[in-house]
Image: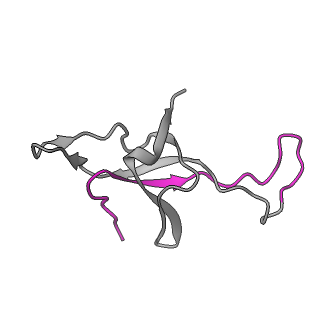
Amino acid sequence: MTLKPLGDRVLVKPAPKEEKTSTGLYISSGAQEKPQRGQVVAVGAGKLNDKGERIAIDVKVGDEVYYGKFGGNEVKIDGEDFLLLRADDIYAVIED
């Protein structure tokens, strides 16, 4: 199945949950925090302004991003978990 986000929506593949602390201790599945980092998989065309012109989205497919902890909707595609966010819920692009 393919999912094409509409408007200013962005489809993100969340990073795997942290299973160990920085000191090497294992974290139980109940205590693991929801990731706030992921990779952009698909991007909508952008939303329309008052004049009917498209406003470009600041991220592109392949970007690593930080997003809001409670933003977006979880979706499952072909057994994999994704997050469908508004572009405004993305806080930063991670650059190396």
29 is higher (above) or lower (below) than 8: below
Question: The N terminus is located in which quarter?
Answer: bottom left
79 is higher (above) or lower (below) than 6: below
Left or right of residue 33: residue 64: left
**Extreme-front residue of the structure:** 50
5 is higher (above) or lower (below) than 24: below
Image coordinates for residue 22, horizontal then vertical, percent? 83, 40
Q: How is the image coloured?
A: one colour
Q: Nearer the viewer, residue 60 or 69?
A: 69
Q: Is residue 9 magenta?
A: yes
Location of residue 56 (image quadrant): top left
Chain part drawn in magenta: 1-27
Image coordinates for residue 38, horizontal then vertical, percent? 54, 48
Residue lying at 34% horizontally and 66% vertically, measured from the top left: 2
Is the stretch drawn in magenta largely helix, strand or loop?
A: loop
**Extreme-left residue of the structure:** 51
Left or right of residue 24: residue 51: left
Left or right of residue 16: residue 54: left
Residue lying at 13% horizontally and 42% vertically, measured from the top left: 53
Residue lying at 27% horizontally and 58% vertically, measured from the top left: 6
